[in-house]
Image (cartoon, rainbow, N blue to C red):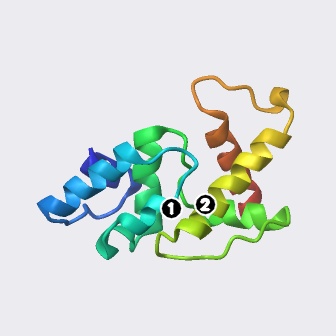
Amino acid sequence: MLHLIDDWMGHERIKIGGEQEIMLRLFLLAIRYPDTLLFDSLDEVLVNDIRRLSAYLHFSSHTYTIWDDDTRRGLAKLGFEIPDTKNADPFIYGAYVGTIELIKDLAPFTCFLEHDVPRQRLFQAALAAYGRE
């Protein structure tokens, strides 16, 4: 599964040992949205790429949002400054996820009806497009 996600994201396939892969798979099973504090339980090798780890979370749970610079810029235009980071910091990523969730909860339900794509993902796509403008 991890290699499929890496391929879809355009990343080089992750090179980790057997114990680290087990740790990562257990992490993906144990974490519950919107918790991000479990990041601290992972080896440094596993948290050195927030974009990759957020993709693993997204595709294993369909609720976590993928870390994206365009989305961060869209949030900044709305007044929500999320610091840039390469490492999976639980507090920065938690603020990113929580802010998108807050905006989703504040928006009228009729703006983004949920269908095949979760509303969270629709909001992230809209924020990313807004950030690219």
Let me know if residue 133 appears in the view. Answer: no
Residue at x 66% of width, y 47% of height: 125
Q: Is residue 126 above or below residue 68?
A: above
Mark 2 touches mark 1? (CB < 8 Å): yes
Residue bearing mark 2: 94
Residue 45 rendering spot, x and y as whole percentages: 30, 73
- Of helix, strand and loop, which one carries label 2? helix
Q: Judge left or right: residue 111 versus residue 62.
A: right
* Disc 2 residue type (three-letter): Gly
> Along the line of sight, which residue is nearer the eye, 35 or 113?
35
* Disc 1 residue type (three-letter): Leu
Q: Is residue 65 above or below residue 52?
A: above
Q: Judge left or right: residue 68 versus residue 58.
A: right
Residue bearing mark 1: 37
Circle 1 Cα neighbour tier, 10 Å, few/some/many (<14 / 14–19 / ≥20): few
Q: Quadrant of the C terminus?
A: bottom right
Residue 20 rendering spot, x and y as whole percentages: 21, 62
Q: Judge left or right: residue 32 versus residue 9.
A: right
Residue at x 37% of width, y 48% of height: 28
Residue 59 rendering spot, x and y as whole percentages: 42, 42
Task: Answer with the quarter of the image where residue 123 lies.
Answer: top right
Q: Is residue 3 above or below residue 84?
A: above
Let me know if residue 89 appears in the view. Answer: yes
